[in-house]
Image (tube, rainbow, N blue to C red):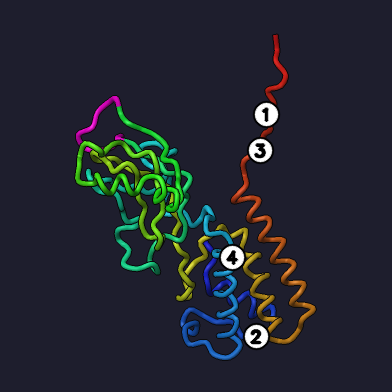
Amino acid sequence: MATTYLQLTNELLRESNEVVLTSSTFSGAVGIQAHVKDCVNRSYNDIVMAEPRWSFLATGESGTTDPFYGNVNVETVAGTRWYELKASSSSVANDYGAINWDDFYLTTIGVSGESAPYTSKNLRFATLEDWKDFRRESENVDDADTQTYGTPNVVFRSTDGRKFGVSPIPDKVYKVWFFAYDLPTALSAHGDTIVFPDMYSTVLLARARYYMHQFKDDSQVAAFALDDYKRGLRRMRSNLLNPAPKYITDDRVKVI
């Protein structure tokens, strides 16, 4: 069972020999209890914001058609270049927290009316400056000419970060798959749970202790807690972000 906001708060209160909270008193906490709640939330936000591409922030599992495709897809429209990354979002505050821009994939698999042979290809990321310098002028001049439409091979990010564009302008419907990560939500109710595995709750507690001892002007104990937090965060990064082995290949030796 995931660790709750109440459990984390009470663990720190017990360490400080303070009165613990209950589900009924949690929302009305004052004084040191309210401060500990703030320390937990601040620490929680520190962890989830340390790496916007934590695996536990992924918007969803990989694509249903093929895990390689991604966890979000947007369908193109013939003659349309720009697309919202998150169509349901009304502002940047509700957009995705991060996008893997180097892993966009275009396919006709899963598109209504399409059949084999399908189109499937990686979309190369290009900066907006590269697109403006080498493609925008000619494509904008001919944007009303359907004969210049084609299968996109490049994806780029809009200036405000809320849309992606493709080039050439699509000539039909394609699915564009990519990996997206959600923005974290602050802990609020006593039953709210942390989004990462329970085994890493000690990292959050170490960070919260740092803030608590800073408040008490106990700089030495705060420094110890900060060291614990940094070690724990390194372990989280190692386990959750770099789990795959790395290989070095060398083709200078040939077997005859």
Q: Which residue is mark 1?
A: 249
Q: Is residue 65 left or right of residue 32?
A: left
- Along the line of sight, which residue is nearer the eye, 140 or 51? 140
The local secondary structure at tag 4 comes to helix
Of labels 2 and 4, earlier in sequence is 2
Q: Nearer the viewer, mark 2 or mark 4?
A: 4
The quarter of the rendered structure image containing the C terminus is top right
Q: Nearer the viewer, mark 4 or mark 3?
A: 3
Labelled disc at residue 246:
3
Q: Which residue is mark 2?
A: 18
CA distance separating discs 1 and 2? 58 Å
Q: Residue 131: percent from the left, percent from the top?
A: 40, 48
Q: Are marks 4 and 1 in contact (CB under 8 Å)?
A: no
120 magenta-colored: no
Of labels 4 and 1, earlier in sequence is 4
| Number of marks present in the image shown | 4
Vertical placement of residue 92 versus 147, above or below? below
Of labels 4 and 3, earlier in sequence is 4
CA distance separating discs 1 and 3? 10 Å
CA distance separating discs 4 and 1? 35 Å
Which kind of residue does numbered mark 4 sit on?
A: Ile
Q: Nearer the viewer, mark 2 or mark 3?
A: 3
Which kind of residue does numbered mark 1 sit on?
A: Thr
Vertical placement of residue 91 versus 15, above or below? above
Of labels 1 and 2, earlier in sequence is 2
The residue shown at (57%, 75%) is 42
The residue shown at (72%, 19%) is 253
The stretch of residues the image draws in magenta is 108-117
Q: Residue 3: percent from the left, percent from the top?
A: 54, 65
Vertical placement of residue 146 versus 131, above or below? above
CA distance separating discs 4 and 3? 26 Å
